[in-house]
Image (spheres, rainbow, N blue to C red):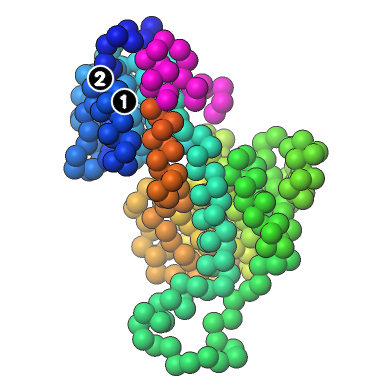
Amino acid sequence: MSPSSRDRLRVTVTRRLPEAVETRMKELFDVSLNETDQKMTRDELATAMRVSDVLVPTVTDQIDANMLAQAGERLKLISNYGAGVDHIDVLSARQRGVLVSNTPGVVTEDTADMTLALILAVTRRIPEGLAEMQAGRWGGWAPTSHLGGRVGGRRLGILGMGRIGQAVARRANVFGMQVHYHNRKRLRPEVEEDLQATYWESLDQMLARMDIISVNAPHTPATFHLLNARRLKLLKPSAVVINTSRGEVIDENALTRMLRADEIAGAGLDVFEHGHEINPRLRELTNVVLLPHMGSATVEGRAEMGEKVIINIKTFADGHRPPDLVVPGML
C-alpha cells in the first residue's frame, strides 16, 4: 500500500537531474538531491533506501538482491530515471513489495539519431578527418584521401526491433539502406511493410550477410554476449558494428581482437561492457568511434525523462499503479 497522498513522500535522487525537473520534485515531494553528482557508494545507496519511500536511480546505480535486502520496510517504489532496468533486480524488488518503474519511449528518437550518426561517422571516417584538421595536418584536397564508403545500398541488420530499432529502420530507409532485422518476435506484416524490413529468424544467417550491424536490444540474461566471439566471426571483414543499446550484448574483448586484426572493418560504440572502464586497446584503434553513453543526451529527452519519473511517483502517491510499471515478465 502506498503512503497516504496527504503526506509528502520522501524521495531520494541519486544523481543531478535537469534543474526544472529537480525544482518540480521539490514542489511535490520531500526530496533529497545529490548536489555533488558523484556516483553513490553501495553504503550510501543502502542508507538512501532505508530512509526513503521512493528511490530515483540511474543506470550508474547497481541495485541487486543484496542491496534490496538492506532497504528495510519504508521503500515502496524505485522510479528509474531511464528506460533500461538491467541495473535493477526487478524480481527481487517485487518479492520485497517494491515496485519498479522506468521512462520508456522518450529516448527513442534521440538514440536512433545517434545510431545513424555513428554509422556515418564510421563509414565516412569523420573522426579521422576531424583529428587531422584539429592537429593542423591537412595538406589540402586529394582524390584518394579520406576515402570512406557510401551508406546507400548497404545492408543494415538491426538486432532488436523495438521502439528504437524501428526508429533506426525508418532513418535507414531515408538513407537508401536495405533494412533487415532479427528480433525475439517477428513484427506484424503491416509493420514490416511500412519499415521495408526483412525478417531473419536465424541471427547467425543474418550476421553473415550484413554490411552494418546495429545493436538495439536490451541487456537481459538472454542477450548477454549475444554477439559472442563465434557470432562476430560470422561477420564479413568489411562489416561495421554499431552499439547504442547496452555494452553487455557484445563480447567486448572478442570485438577488440577482431578489430585489431582487421577481421571487422570498424565499430561505433556509445556503450561498453564494463561501464566507463573501456579496454585501452579499443581506444587506440582508428577504425573505432567511441562516445560516452550520450545516445539520449538531449535537453529535450532528459527533461521528458524527468517528467515521466514525476508522473510515476505522483500516480503512486495517489494510490494508483505507476503508468510505466516494470514487471519481471516484461524482461
Residue 44 percent location from the top left of the image: 20, 30
Task: Say few, some or many: other residues with alpha carbon within 10 Å of mark 2 (under 14 / 14 to 19 / 20 or more).
Answer: some
Q: Position of residue 147 (x, y in %)?
A: 59, 81
Q: Secondary structure at mark 2?
A: strand
From the image, tell me which residue sits under label 2.
10
Residue at image point 36% right, 10% down: 2
Q: Return the disc, 2 or 1, that comes first in the chain's sequence.
A: 2
**How far from the left and from the top, in percent, is residue 139?**
44, 93
| Above/below status of 152 relative to 15 | below
Residue name at image x 45 percent, y 44 percent: 301
Q: Please tell me in which quadrant of the rendered image residue 33 appears.
A: top left
Camera-nearest residue between 76 and 92:
76
Question: Relative to 147, is 305 above or below?
Answer: above
Depth-wise, is mark 2 or mark 1 nearer the camera? Answer: 2
Q: Give 242 or 171, whichever is nearer the viewer.
A: 171
User: Residue at 43% of width from left, 76% of height from top?
Assistant: 130
Distance (Cα) linking label 2 and label 1: 9 Å
- What segment carries the magenta color? 311-331
Q: Is residue 110 above or below residue 314?
A: below
**Which residue position is annotated with label 1?**
55
Residue toward you, 106 or 280: 106
In this image, 264 relative to 288: left or right?
A: right
Q: Quadrant of residue 63?
A: top left
**Is 312 within the magenta?**
yes
Q: Position of residue 160 (x, y in %)?
A: 62, 43
For numbered disc 1, what is the local secondary structure?
Answer: strand
